[in-house]
């Protein structure tokens, strides 16, 4: 006796469901993953400005935070003014742009001292700000 199935063949729908699951997981991964890459490890309260920052691809980032030791971050590495001078020569090979993220509480003289060091080393300097809220 031969048994036959009375169900219709729905193989098309059977294989599209796992494919849609994989596509949705990839979309979610890239949406949340891109936000995690841009976040810095140090919170900085930027001053406000109505001007916008020019595009700076592959730029070096100097993050100035308020502290008593005079240390700050150069490309996610904690440095001081003396060690910054040595790193700038090596960094010029990669890119000639530097973006300075200075907290509002950092002294203006300290920010200008760092920017003078960077300019003397041959870099182009941009200061990061946040947009003014009207």
Image (spheres, rainbow, N blue to C red):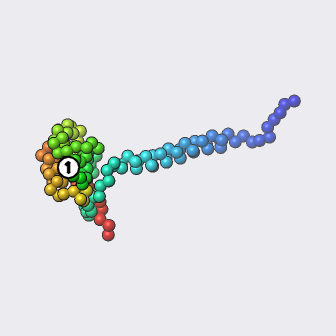
Q: Which residue is mark 1?
A: 70
The residue depicted at 28 percent of the width and 46 percent of the height is 57
Is any part of residue 56 visible from this angle? yes
The residue depicted at 18 percent of the width and 42 percent of the height is 84
Q: Position of residue 27 (x, y in %)?
A: 49, 47
Left or right of 6 in this view: 55: left
Q: Is residue 92 above or below residue 51?
A: above
Q: Position of residue 51 (x, y in %)?
A: 25, 61
Residue reaching furthest to the bottom: 134
Residue reaching furthest to the top: 1
Which of the pair 57/127 is nearer the observer?
127
Q: Position of residue 13 (x, y in %)?
A: 65, 43
Which of the pair 113/52 is nearer the observer?
113
Q: Position of residue 28 (x, y in %)?
A: 49, 48
Q: Secondary structure at mark 1?
A: loop
Label 1 CA crowd tier, 10 Å (few <14, some 14–19, many 20+): few
Residue reaching furthest to the left: 120
Q: How many marks?
A: 1
Q: Quadrant of the N terminus?
A: top right
Which of the pair 5/49 is nearer the observer?
49
Is any part of residue 98 visible from this angle? no
The residue depicted at 27 percent of the width and 58 percent of the height is 46
Residue reaching furthest to the front: 68
The residue depicted at 23 percent of the width and 48 percent of the height is 72
Q: Quadrant of residue 11?
A: top right
Q: Is residue 126 above or below residue 11?
A: below
Q: Quadrant of the C terminus?
A: bottom left
């Amino acid at each position: 006796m031969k048994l036959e199935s009375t169900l219709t063949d729905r193989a098309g729908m059977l294989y599209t469901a796992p494919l849609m699951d994989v596509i949705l997981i990839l979309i979610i991964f890239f949406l949340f993953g891109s936000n995690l890459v841009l976040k810095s490890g140090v919170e900085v309260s930027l001053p406000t400005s109505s001007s916008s920052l020019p595009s700076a691809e592959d730029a070096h980032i100097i993050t100035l935070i308020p502290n008593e030791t005079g240390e700050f971050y150069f490309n996610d590495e904690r440095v001081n003014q003396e060690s910054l001078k040595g790193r700038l020569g090596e960094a010029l090979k990669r890119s000639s742009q530097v973006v300075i993220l200075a907290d509002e509480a950092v002294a203006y003289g300290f920010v200008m001292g760092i920017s003078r060091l960077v300019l003397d080393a041959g870099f182009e300097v941009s200061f990061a700000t946040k947009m003014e809220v009207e």
